[in-house]
Amino acid sequence: MEKMRVPVWFWIVVGVMLLWNLVGVGSFFMHTGMSEETLATLPDEEQAMYAAYPTWALIAFAVAVFGGVVGCVGLLMRKKWAKFILILSLIGIIIQMFHSLIIARATEVYGPGAVVMPIMVIVIAVFLVWLANFSIKKHWLT
């Protein structure tokens, strides 16, 4: 089956989503590369959250952000495997947010506004999985 012509909006949306996921990668490196000096400037509650951050949540964070980047690159390359990678990214996000909101109780440290970003991240990840599936059905991906 030959590839169908992809509308311009697809490229724009996926490009913006790639940039969004690259910001997530930056956040990951800020989180993992925080110096002791910088950590010491945070309030005690935040320092405790960083100190108690488990490896499995860090792995979920990595899968979430790097999976989002690779999945978006896959969409730009018009590859069906992008959907699988984006699903893995979504699973990573859900695990990471479960840790943050339920286990670490981030809302107790940051307040109720701490749920806004996780909800937005999940909605965008679900949208990307939907977009990949939609693109497969339209025969834009091979």
Image (cartoon, rainbow, N blue to C red):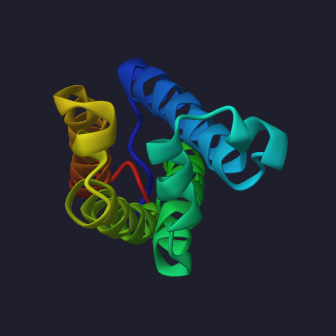
Give the residue at the far bottom of this rendering: 56
Q: Residue at x 37, y 20 (%)?
A: 9
User: Residue 5: x and y, percent?
Assistant: 41, 35
Q: Residue at x 80, y 49 (%)?
A: 36
User: Residue 12: x and y, percent?
Assistant: 47, 21
Give the side of residue 26 with respect to residue 126, left or right.
right
Q: Is residue 25 above or below residue 96?
A: above
Nearest the camera: 34 or 136? 34
User: Residue 74: x and y, percent?
Assistant: 55, 55
Q: Which quarter of the rendering shows the C terminus? A: bottom left
Nearest the camera: 60 or 41? 41
Q: Is residue 81 above or below residue 15?
A: below
- The number of numbered badges drawn on the structure is 0
Q: Is residue 138 above or below residue 15?
A: below
| Residue 24 appearing in the image | yes
Give the residue at the far front of this rendering: 44
User: Residue 91: x and y, percent?
Assistant: 32, 69
Q: Residue at x 60, y 34 (%)?
A: 42
Q: Residue at x 53, y 40 (%)?
A: 21
Name the image quarter holding residue 25: top right
Give the side of residue 69 with respect to residue 34, left or right.
left
| Residue 78 appearing in the image | no
Q: Which quarter of the rendering shows the N terminus? A: bottom left
